[in-house]
Image: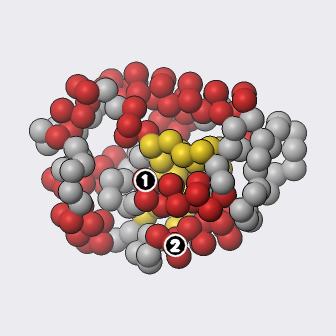
Amino acid sequence: MVIIVMGVSGTGKSTVGQALADRLGWSFEDADDLHSPESRRKMASGTPLTDADRQPWLVLLRARLEKALTQGEDLVLAFSALKRAYRERLSVDASRERWVYLHAPAAVIQARLQERVGHFMPPALLPSQLGAMEPPEDALSVDVTPPPDVVVGHILDGLGLKPGDGLGLKAGAPRK
């Protein structure tokens, strides 16, 4: 099974995603780690990525999900997934994927971005991400204003999961 934790920069995708993976005993992958050096430089300079900039990245992410699902690896992926087209491009097998949309008021996210140190994504790009975000209709929607451990609890409850669940869920297995 794969859980994709999505949202704009500053919603805690990496923090929540890693904590969720730890609680479940699953692997974790941060899509930001797969950005090209050119894309990282572009964002760090304050320039939003274009759809064309994102295409090679989406190919890498889809390959990672395909590998996980083929090998029966349970994986949590932190991925912005701003647009429906990106989510559709990334989806491999909807029966073994769960999407979790992290969100909070813009002021909360902006404050978090202002406090963040060492990340290539500057706070100045938040408005472009909020403008590009097409909220999903088919994802578990979770407000990330509470602390990460509370958010992870909401995700586990919302998906009907507990530590040890997933573990190589194969196609055709009952959905949670």
Q: Earlier in the sequence, mark 2 or mark 1?
A: 1
At label 2, the amino acid type is: Asp
Q: Which residue is mark 1?
A: 14
Question: Looking at the image, do the residues carrying marks 2 and 1 touch, with CB atoms under 8 Å apart?
Answer: no
Foreground residue among 82 and 74: 74
Count residues near mark 1 (Cα–Cα under 10 Å), then give few for <14, some for 14-19, many for 20+. Answer: many
Q: Is residue 58 above or below residue 165?
A: above
Quarter containing the C terminus: bottom right
Q: Quadrant of residue 105?
A: bottom left
- Residue 139 visible: yes
Determine the residue positioned at 38% across, 37% down: 33
Give the CA separation, mark 2 to mark 1.
13 Å
Q: Is residue 107 above or below residue 74?
A: below
Count residues near mark 2 (Cα–Cα under 10 Å), then give few for <14, some for 14-19, many for 20+. Answer: some
Return the x and y of residue 35 as percentages of the image width and height: 34, 31
Q: Please give the label number shown on residue 1.
A: none
Determine the residue positioned at 53% across, 76% down: 150
Instruction: Please tell me whether mark 1 sits on a helix, a strand or a loop.
Output: helix
Q: Quadrant of residue 94?
A: top right
At label 1, the amino acid type is: Ser
Determine the residue positioned at 64% across, 27% down: 67
Determine the residue positioned at 60% across, 72% down: 153
> How many marks are shown on the rendered structure?
2
Q: Please give the label number shown on residue 149.
A: 2
Relative placement, left or right, of 158 versus 32 is right
Return the x and y of residue 61 as percentages of the image width and height: 50, 31
